[in-house]
Amino acid sequence: MGSSDGRALRSLSTPRAAALAGVAFALLFGTVLVVLRTSLPPGAELGSQWIDGTGGRLRVAIVLTPFSGIAFLWFIGVLRDGLGRLEDRFFTTVFLGSGLLFLAMVFAGTAVGAGLLASKHFVAAGGTRTEVAAFGQGLLVALTNTYALRMAAVFMMSLATIWLRTRLMPRWLVAVTYLVAVAVLIGSDVSPWATLAFPVWVLVVSLLLLVDPAASTRLPDTP
């Protein structure tokens, strides 16, 4: 069937190279986490960490976060495209919802960080209102470590369950995904560096989709 002006219509298909979005997210988000961890002096009082932190590094994290979020959206699209007709409404709702909530809270936390960085000079110069900096830093940590990464764990667990039931991915990747999800779920309370497990997992999945085309094989959309 052609269009009214004689042009043939074509259905859209996702190129396999779109999995590079996951690689980009893993590298960008991993860099953001490392920069945030190394820019805040350890052991200092909450609030003074942000005032005494390295502003240049914090600014790098704030600039990179939106680009990592865009790459994560593409990564979600690649994963969902791989499901095809095997997509289940219940698990897909949890999968998409947790991914979008993770992204929203990372953006919200970064916005708080940008506000703290913009007010850093005024708080440090006046020597007062450090409680505002303490509140902002506590909010940032709660959004990124507590809530965003918990949603990342739910994202991985729901995706691992989908892979387990549809057999789209190898069993070893399903097992690794569950283990990483548990590590992210409880690891951020033990060590802040445990949060790097999530971008590393995204990197492994993306490389698997790029190297092994059979890993993302799905049923055709039309019978």
Image (spheres, grey):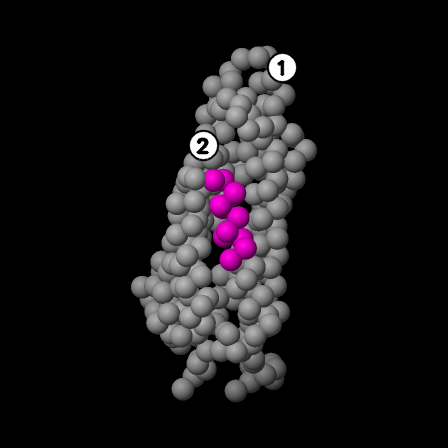
Give the residue type that dot 2 points to. Leu
Give the residue type that dot 1 points to. Ala
Q: Which residue occupies 60% across, 72% down?
A: 211
Q: Is residue 176 above or below residue 130?
A: below
Q: Which mark is residue 125?
A: 1
Q: Nearer the viewer, residue 184 or 7?
A: 184
Does the rendering let one see residue 155? Answer: no
In this view, which residue lies farthest toward the left? Answer: 90
Q: Quadrant of residue 176?
A: bottom left
Does the rendering let one see residue 131? Answer: yes
In this view, which residue lies farthest toward the right? Answer: 56
Q: Give the main secondary structure of the magenta stretch.
A: helix
Give the magenta-colored segment's residue range: 191-201
Q: Which mark is residue 139?
A: 2
Q: Are marks 2 and 1 in contact (CB under 8 Å)?
A: no
Q: Is residue 6 above or below residue 127?
A: below
Q: Is residue 125 above or below residue 144?
A: above
Q: Which residue occupies 53% across, 37% down?
A: 111
Q: Nearer the viewer, residue 96 or 32?
A: 32
What x and y, as percent, mark residue 113?
55, 33
Circle 1 SS class? helix
Q: Quadrant of residue 166?
A: bottom left
What x and y, as percent, mark residue 217?
49, 78
What x and y, as percent, mark residue 193?
52, 43
